[in-house]
Amino acid sequence: METKISTSLNDFRTETRAWLETNCPASMRQPVKDPFDLFWGGRNAKFISEDQRLWFERMLEKRWVVPYWEVKYGGAGLSSDENNVLTQEMTRLGCRKPLYSFGISMLGPALLKFATEDQKLHYLPQIVEGKIWWCQGYSEPNAGSDLASLQTKAIDKGDHYEITGSKVWTSYADKSDWIFCLVRTDFEATKHNGISFILIDMASKGVSTRPIKLISGKSPFCETFFDEVKVPKENLIGNLNQGWTIAKHLLTHERQMIGGIGETDVKKEVYSIALENLPVNNGIISDSILRNQISDFEMNEEIFDLTIQRVTDEAKTGNNSGALSSFFKFYATELNISRHELLMAIGGSEALFWGENEKSDGDLARKFCRSKGNSIEGGTSEIQLNIISKLILGLPTK
């Protein structure tokens, strides 16, 4: 069923709002408290509720899982304006994403730009339909911020590549079906020029994973090992040794994802949480210092949302947001850390509790610890500041 595009954007908004209000179950409008409140898809996909299944299937039929992709790739072919309206209306209702997938936010844009048409037709519809759970194989034990130093090697064996090496901080590798991976294919070239981008089935012989336990008590991260893994040559994306170009393009979208661009989940306002938990005087938080800190935070959050909207509108005119993704990533990281610091301050001593008791499940303390990781993943904050200074502000390098 293809989406019927209205001639008027206002009509499209009216139709979209009515459809969402009718078809999005009430439980799918609740704030996301855990990553697994969302549907991730995959070979062994499981829905946590009947409402989640209905929401995904309705959005899939509407072609709104990835609405801005072309119809032939499983999308609805919505224009930028129409997609913006859909995002706004989903945000207004608090609709959860029907499918959460690194295939949508990271791999998909890279495939659209660098893959062959046959590869696009093969992989993109599977991403939309949630058939594959994807993970990212970039960082290595000795190649994090200096990613181009990676050493996982792909040896040409005629009709296939033989891949040996390891990756680290691979989110959800132990649950994923496939991995998009950077490998070294030329050891004689300079480090940036000898890298290729390849897709690997995690069920292949020689692939293994090991979860990394975090202080937060939960571990999405894994070590991933490749021991002479055979990968068909048709799984290479782009040209041989073009991987660094693809990696930079994909990192832009990863940083936009971390920065929250396109998110529809509505978080409860910090001020509202404070009113429920702190002494108030005539409807105003009594602690003036904390009240001012919350006001500063919520103003900065609103400024950030408006900046995202402005840059999104500028992108429609052809302005590239590549370097700006570093700004989004850095600022969103700082906002998220500030948010959790304020929530800890509001919670007081009870927020420090790590385990479970009659008043707390320790989730806030764990999320506070986890928020610090935002300053590392997707490129450290120091790396983002270097990019911002050189490519956005135009500051001299010396």
Image (spheres, rainbow, N blue to C red):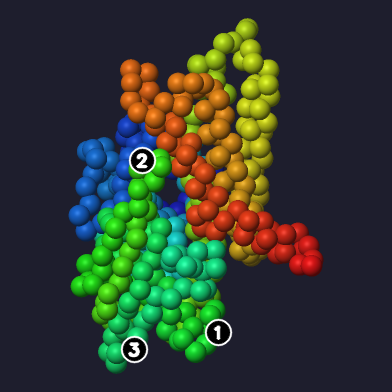
Residue type at mark 2 is: Gly
Residue at the spot of label 2? 217
Distance of mark 2 from mark 1, alpha carbons? 40 Å
Q: In the image, what residue type sits under mark 3?
A: Asp
Residue highlighted by disc 1: 190
* Residues marked 1 and 3 touching at CB (< 8 Å): no
Horizontal side of residue 168 vs 12, given as left or right: left
Distance from Cα at disc 3 to Cα at disc 2: 41 Å
Q: Residue at point 26% right, 59% down?
A: 131
User: Quadrant of the image for the C terminus?
Assistant: bottom right
Residue 119 shows in the view:
no
* Above or below 44: residue 284: above
Disc 2, SS: loop
Q: Position of residue 333 (x, y in %)?
A: 57, 46
Pick the residue in front: 4 or 197. Answer: 197
Residue at label 3?
156
Where disc 3 sits, the SS reads strand
* Image coordinates for residue 41, horizontal then vertical, percent: 28, 53
**Residue situated in front as seen by the camera: 217 or 121:** 217
Residue type beneath disc 1: Thr
Q: Disc 1 to disc 3, how far (Cα)?
A: 19 Å
- Residue at the spot x=62%, y=47% of the render? 331
In terms of secondary structure, where does tag 1 sit? Answer: loop
